[in-house]
Each structure stands twice: as C-alpha cells, then as structure tokens.
Image: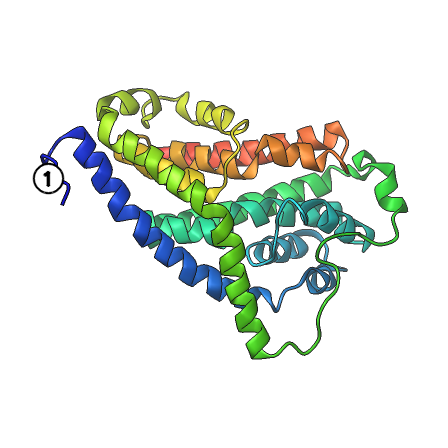
Amino acid sequence: MLTLPPGKQLTSALEFFLYEAPKVLMLLILVVFAVGVVRSFFTAERTRRILSGKREIVGNGMAALLGTVTPFCSCSAVPLFLGFVTSGIPLGVTFSFLISAPMVNEVALVLLVGLFGWKIAAIYFGTGLAIAIASGWAIGRLGMEKYVEEWVFANADGEGCARSEEQDITWEKRLRLGLDAVRDIVGKVWPYLLAGIAIGAGIHGYVPENFMASIMGSGAWWSVPLAVVLGIPMYSNAAGIIPVVQALLEKGVALGTALAFMMSVIGLSLPEMIILRKVLKTRLIATFAGVVGTGILIVGFLFNLVM
C-alpha cells in the first residue's frame, strides 16, 4: 500500500513494526484479561496469609510463584513490603516476592511468547524464578533485618492501596476485574510497547548485524556485565524493553547477553530502588542489587556458554 521498494532499510523497519505491533497487542489483551481473572483469587491479604509461617526454600519458592500472579505496581510495592514484614513473613521470602513480581509477570511472558516463541519464554520464566528464589534465600541467610528502617517494625499493620479482601466474589465480578485489568495494564503499557517496537524496528532496519555481533556476541566476554550495567539506570518495563531485545537478537547479540540486559532493566531498575529506600537502608538495597545482579550474570554467562 505504501509502494516502498523491497529490501530497503526503511521498508524493513516498517515491516517489522506493522507486523509485530498488532500481533503483540492482541495477544497482550487476551492474556492480561485471563490473568486479571486469576488475580481475583490472589489479593494482597490472601497472599500474606499463604506466605505467613513459611520458612526457608519452601517459602521462597511459593513467594516467587505468587509474585507472577499478584498485582504489583509503584503504588503497592512499599505497602506490600510493609504488610509482609509486619505479618511475620521472613525478610528473604519477602524479597523473593519483590524480585519475582516485576521480573516474571504476564506482560513479560506474553511479549516473549509473541516475539520469540515458547522456548525462550520458558527459559526466561524458569531463570527468573530461579533468581528470585535463590536471591531471596541468600538475603534471608545473611540476617539483614537490622537494615530495614526501624519504623517498619513499629508499624502494626501495612498500609497500602490493596488492603481489604472481598469475600464470595461472583464470576461476573471476576470477569469485570479481568476487563479492568485490560484497561489498567494495557492502558498503561501500550505507549511503552509501541515505543519499544519502534526502537526495535529502527535497530532491525538500520543497525548492521556485524556491528552488534562484534560488541555483544557470545565471543565477547565483557558483553554480559556490560549489559547488566547498562540496564540498571534505564527506566522501562517489559513492554518497552522486550521488542528492543528481539531486534538485538536478530542483529547477532547473544541470547545470554540479551536475557541479562532484559532482566537488569526490569528487575534492577534504579527507580524501584529509590522507592524501596523508603523502607530499606542503603546497605540492604546494595546487597539486594548485588545478589540479584550476580544471579543475572550467572544466567547470562551460562546461556552464552551453552546456547
């Protein structure tokens, strides 16, 4: 329809954008609706009750799994942390939840399936959960409760935007909650999604393949730590960063390097650390970043070695 000559850079970039944008948006709407319905069974209060009394690796595993289906946003990050800690949930278990919720969520999985297929989506899901579980366990073993701000433990009950729990929710209400999730989540992420696809389209059409392979290919040992360092100060979510990662992979960036970059942007974002500074002392935040960052580095080097 645009009468653009085939094989040109602009044509290739536009083809990438016009093919990926509607496909991912449609898939995102369907899965967010389904997860919105599932989330009606996992309110913040119910999640706290499930995790209460759980210790060590069992609690870390349950917390990481619950993080994938529990609402988690800038409004609820600090209140959920407060509620978990003041309910007696171990600090390490709480961190497994906090790491998993932003990193392994339905938006990330939908985009990964839509752009890369089930294999890479499953790899990301598995390694993301492993990092959340191992990092939470490690933080718990370090006994760093003293580096939580004192006022947190003086707070008898967490305050937040998701405090009460409705009883006996009907299926009509659950379906409405699914539609609300679509309006809320898709309504927030679609600009990031389109921006990310646009950037990916630009990389797809204009960046030479050999250039990216030379600096971020599997043969460049520095590519994984460089990807992690570059990802931390970036402010983006899964919707914005995954289409960029797809284009980088097409240009020769190694899978482990791409996964490390994506996990760093989503799981170690500087804005999230600034928010958590309200309840955590600097040493605990640094430990959190160091432990999670080490896990991401291991994942990156491992997949560059075997893939």
Q: Is residue 53 left or right of residue 27?
A: right
Mark 1 crowdedness (10 Å alpha carbons): few <14, some 14-19, many ≥20: few
Residue 118 appears in view: yes
* Residue pictured at 61% horizontal, 69% vertical: 41
Q: Which residue in the rendered view is the most extreme toward the right?
A: 154
User: From the viewer's perspective, is 144 left or right of 202?
Assistant: right
Q: Taking 36 as reference, is 140 above or below it?
A: above
The x and y percentages for residue 264 are 51, 34
Instruction: From the viewer's side, name the closer residue of 146 and 43.
Output: 43
Q: What colour scheme has been applied to the protein in the rendered image?
A: rainbow
Q: Secondary structure at mark 1?
A: loop
**Residue at x 76% of width, y 50% of height:** 90
Image coordinates for residue 176, horizontal then vertical, percent: 55, 70
Q: Is residue 278 above or below residue 43?
A: above
Given residues 298 and 79, the one toward you in this image is 79
- Type of the residue with mark 1: Thr
Tell me if I can see residue 306 in this picture: no
Q: Count of labels shown?
A: 1
- Measuring 31% from the left and 52% from the top, which residue is drawn there? 22
The residue to which callout 1 is attached is 3
Q: Quadrant of the C terminus?
A: top left
**Residue 115 to residue 202: above or below:** below
Q: Residue at x 65, y 57 (%)?
A: 58
Quadrant in the picture for the N terminus = top left
* Residue 162 sits in quarter: bottom right
